[in-house]
Amino acid sequence: MNTPTILKSELVAKADRLGELDALVKDATKELETLKKEFKSIGMEHVEGVKFAINLIKGKTTSLDREKMLEELGEEALVRYQKVTEYVSVRVSPR
């Protein structure tokens, strides 16, 4: 992995800033989800605010029941269609 040259003090500052932003996003996401839930429970399809309009969109999603497929078809049948995706994540923990 290529690591750019960066001072330790810069990394410390960036780590702290990342943690601050992570906390802000978590708080904002919590409030966002609470408001969305409230709008869904009210059931109005359209609400006009001063700055934004809110529309409730209804839809359906379809998914495959992996456990049922595994039970009925067996592991060998599923492995042929399996897709593995590698990733790297950043975890933020308070000190």
Image: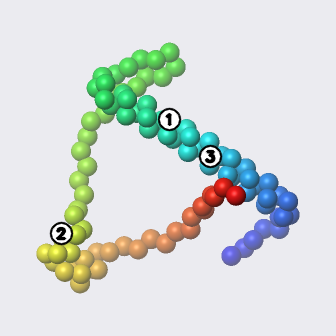
Other-residue count near label 3 (Cα within 10 Å), few / some / many at <14 / 14–19 / ≥20 = some
Which of the two labelled residues, at mark 3 and mark 1, occupies the earlier sequence position? 3
Q: Which residue is mark 1?
A: 31
Circle 1 — which element?
A: helix
Quarter residue 67 falls in: bottom left
Are the residues flagged by discs 3 and 1 in contact, CB closer than 8 Å?
Answer: no
Viewer-nearest residue: 63 or 25: 25
Viewer-nearest residue: 79 or 67: 67
In this rendering, the answer to whether 40 lies above or below 73 is above
* Location of the N terminus (image quadrant): bottom right
Q: Which residue is mark 2?
A: 68
Q: Does residue 15 show up?
A: yes
> Relative to 33, is 22 on the left or the right?
right
Quarter residue 48 falls in: top left
Q: Which residue is mark 3?
A: 23
Q: Work out how far the residue at label 3 is from the one at label 1, CA to CA, in angstroms.
A: 13 Å
- Expressed as whole percent of the image width and height from the top left, the position of residue 80 reads 28, 80
Which three-letter amino acid code belongs to the residue tagged 3? Ala
Other-residue count near label 1 (Cα within 10 Å), few / some / many at <14 / 14–19 / ≥20 = few
Q: Work out how far the residue at label 2 is from the one at label 1, CA to CA, in angstroms.
A: 36 Å
Which three-letter amino acid code belongs to the residue tagged 2? Lys
> Relative to 18, is 26 on the left or the right?
left
Residue at (23% x, 53% y) in the render: 62
Circle 2 — which element?
A: helix
